[in-house]
Amino acid sequence: MDDQDKMAACERLLREYRFTQCQLTLHGEMVRIQVSPQGFQQFFDTTLRECIVQRLKNVGFTFVSLDLESLPIQPTGELDPPLARDE
């Protein structure tokens, strides 16, 4: 699976779990996830976090990283930005 396919799979997976404000960055065999403050809170659920990590590893990543600096909060009424692809 190439990087573009991996990114698409990650985007679908995070949207399944209702992460709408997030950014993904590929670093070789690692994917870095940056989410909104509300999304960051969701990762405190051990079962959810372990499920997401395992599914991302099944996509082909060796490491999954959650960035401790969350994305800025979107003002009320604005649409969530699409998932970004930073390489």
Image (cartoon, rainbow, N blue to C red):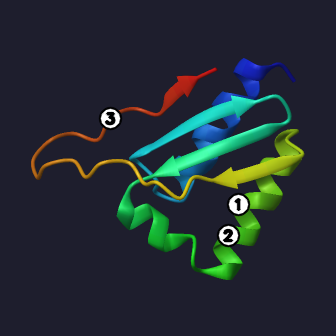
Chain-order first, disc 3 or disc 2: 2
The residue lying at 57 percent from left, 70 percent from top is: 43
The amino acid type, in three-letter code, at marker 1 is: Ile
Camera-side residue: 57 or 37? 37
Q: Position of residue 58 (x, y in %)?
A: 87, 48
Of the numbered discs in the image, which one, if any, rests on residue 52?
Answer: 1
Q: Mark 3 — residue?
A: 81
Distance from label 2 to label 1 (Cα)?
Answer: 5 Å
Secondary structure category for the residue under label 3: loop
The amino acid type, in three-letter code, at marker 3 is: Pro
Camera-side residue: 16 or 30? 30
Secondary structure category for the residue under label 2: helix
The quadrant holding residue 39 is: bottom left
The residue lying at 29 percent from left, 41 percent from top is: 80
Total marks placed: 3
The answer to whether mark 3 and mark 2 are in CB contact below 8 A is no
User: In the figure, is residue 18 to the left or right of 27?
Assistant: left
Picture quarter with the N terminus? top right
